[in-house]
Amino acid sequence: MKKSQKLQRTDYYTKNDMLQNLKIVFRHLSRQKLNTSLHIIGLTLGLSVCLVIALFIRYELSFDAYHEKADRTYRVISKWTQNGKSNYHFSTPFPLANAIRTEVTGLEHVSFAHPVYTKIVEVNPQNRFVDERIMAVEPEFLEIFKVETLKGDLYKTLRTPYQAALTESTAKKLFGNEDPIGKTLSFTVGDKFEFTVGALIKDFPANTHLPASMLVSYSYSEKFLQPNLDGWTYVSGTETLIVVPENADLKIIQSQLKAIVDKHINPKEDLPDFSSDLEIQSLSEVHFNSSLAGGGNWVQAVSPSWLWFFGIIGITVLVLACINFINLSTAQALTRAKEVGVRKSVGAGRFNLIVQFLSEAWILTFISGIFAIASAQLAMPSINSLLDKNIPFDVIQSPILLLFILAAAIFIGLTAGIYPAWVISKFNPSLTLKAGSTSSGDHGSAWLRKGLVVAQFSISIGLLIVVLIISQQVNFLRSKNLGFSKDNIINVDIQPRVNKHELFKNELGKIREVKDVSFATSTPSSQGHWGTIMNRTGRQDPSRKEVTLIFGDDRFCKMYGFELLAGRFLEASDTNYVAKSVAEKDQIMKAVVNEQLIKELEFKSNEEAIGERIWVGWNSGNVEIVGIVSDFNTGPLQEVIKPALITPNARDYEQAGIKIEANSNVPETIAAIETAWKSTYPEGIFSYKFLDEQIDSFYKTEERLFSLFKIFSGLAMFISCLGLWGLATFAAQSRTKEIGIRKVLGASVNKIVVLLSKDFLLLVVVAMVISTPFAWYGINQWLQGYAFRVNISWWIFGFAGIIAVSIAMITVSFQAIKAAMSNPVESLRNE
């Protein structure tokens, strides 16, 4: 009869336990405020990091996906092959779009987008500003890219010569709150061209590779875009776009493009080792394939490894949070032993207890999910600032994201809660009611808990090693000698083809703080260098080498502090020649070259090269080597040192390099330079950059990566410490009687602290041994992307281990000292 009564009581409990379980759960959570807070903090961090990363990945994958025909839209890209090496560029010859219309069959749409190379947009002399995102398009462009019209007739605007469609933000900048339709504005591209506003359009979304500020009409008779647009061997930023039919055979389209190249381009090239080609690139790939053609005129492509990196980091932090949850829950086992014993003695079955503890896990997870959404929303502005993006936080408006969070909460609650629930539910009621013993200290559970801590610290130490090495690499990038001076130099934009160099130089000479001035197309290290091909004059070898071409005056090498190895620098008499056309190719220009060029052209020595002539493809002419300087970095340190040639060409100078006194008052000096600039170029807009800051900007990606690594590694270490704290609590509680006996027998506090801490020290050491090879491999692969990189030193791994051990010992010591200073009478009163 008793057996039957017990069965009835258990059955009754099972059917009516939902509300009772919830009461018990909330009662327990409210009583254990510290443990509840630690559970919620850990899961909130893990979920919020995952949510931010999910928003980031979704944003990156959404680039240009909003266009109706995005899945069938392709960009045609240029390909050049020389000596078996292929190079790509997003831009194509301008006549290509028309040729495709007539020579490629079966396409739905063909169009182009061409940048207007102007920096100054003017409404009136008092209302002028710099705008580099103006795009010339045809009406058919609107059949490919989605553009929302707010006012006016957009199709008519793009069919009518010299009309423009402004985005909302541009219209507001130009005309304030006035209606822009019918108003006029002008561009200066050599000459001044006037346009009438015919339409107002919505701002392009941030997730597009063509974020134009305005669209202007184009007809083939207009000359305001760029000279030499009719040439097939010249690319100038034109993007050619096509839309293919459903189930189109891309191989046939590719072969027809090849026929266009063979007809219009390859026969014109008198280069036996050089060939041109065209390839098509899916619109969905444009934003991600940084190694193939780049992103476009205004938006740089990103590497897909970024998405993998962030995804792995998000999952890693979430796994650490789950491990932390398990360790903290099992650490509470002893404090709940009597509760479990009482409930089992009154008929609660093991299934009921598992449901109760899983309910706790799910409630904690859902609470953490709510806090995670709030935390992510608060963090998003900082994340956007750090990544230089505009990622929207639209979680509440997105059913997919809400379902993702709900599913993640259920899965995490189950995953993180099942093991603690299983362990606690199997306590023996007779032993737990006797003295709080759990009889669950089996070796399997102990090893699992320790294994989880090792896993946490392996990940944390690995991230810490990576942070330290990235820090070294970033510092190396900033401090490496580039082969020229970059300090105290201001680069000021000047108007090319406006020969006022001497006038501007004379005005700058009146400023006491200005030490030197040089005019050039660019700085020695730039991402905008000109490139061409070269060979030794008269050499029968048909192979030709690539060379970086820098146009600079006679002060260029001296002001930037190049080291002269042989010959001389450029002189004033060398700069009198101004290249204008191929017809002047017999004119011998003078040039200073670097060591790498001497090696590429196989001169036996620097001295042998002085006075020798080399053929340069830029103007199909010869230049004479008058000086050789030490190698210098012409671009970011990801790139190897390339052959470089410095020669004068005043017609194309676009910058003035101005060296100022080291201890000068910078704001006052810049103000004086601006005054001199405005007196020389009254029609322009003053713009300047410090050379060292310009070079530092090459490494923005690395700096953002470094910042994110620091944030994530800090979070990972913090969560790992929470888990370690949980395990230390569990260890101290399970060894209470042992500690009491040792104190009675005379053990000091220090000895007991060492006793409780040494096992955890061993776990951290094991974690360091496990993480080291993985961290070394991963960071070594990352460093391979740099031609110039730091050597990985052994002490980095030891230093990371010392930091991890120190943090772990601080975490454990709190519980160890608390246990060591407890009264042994309390732990031994029931023995």
Image: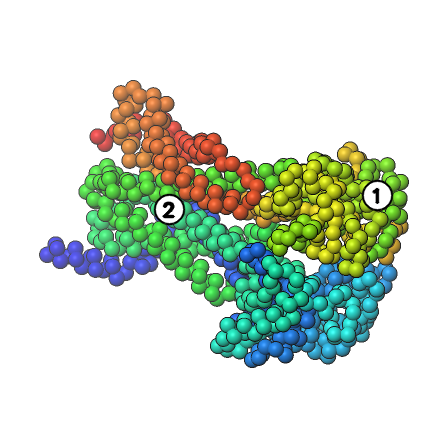
Does dot 2 land on a helix, a strand or a loop? Answer: helix
- Give the labeled residue for mark 1: 572
Can residue 361 be spotted in the picture?
yes
C-alpha gap between disc 1 and disc 2: 71 Å
Say whether residue 345 is left or right of residue 784.
left
- Give the labeled residue for mark 2: 323
Label 1 or label 2, whichever lies nearer to me, is: 1
Image quadrant for the C terminus?
top left
41 vs 769: above or below: below
- Residue at the (72%, 47%) spot, across then down: 613
Q: Quadrant of residue 661?
A: top right
Does dot 1 land on a helix, a strand or a loop? Answer: helix
Say whether residue 551 is left or right of residue 291.
right
- Residue at the (84%, 43%) spot, across then down: 572
**Residue 77 image point, x, y percent:** 60, 65
Front position in the image: 310 or 729: 310
Q: Quadrant of residue 111?
A: bottom right
- Residue at the (65%, 45%) spot, across then down: 597
Image quadrant for the N terminus?
bottom left
Say whether residue 330 is left or right of residue 666.
left
Can residue 147 be spotted in the picture?
no
What crowding class fits label 2: few (fewer than 14 Cα within 10 Å), some (14-19), or many (20 or more)?
many
- What amino acid is labelled 2 in the image? Ile
- Residue at the (80%, 43%) spot, across then down: 554
Specify which label sits upstream in the sequence, 1 or 2: 2
Say whether residue 9 is left or right of residue 257.
left
What crowding class fits label 1: few (fewer than 14 Cα within 10 Å), some (14-19), or many (20 or more)?
few
The image's colouring method is rainbow
**Residue 259 image point, x, y percent:** 58, 72
Q: Which mark is residue 590?
A: none
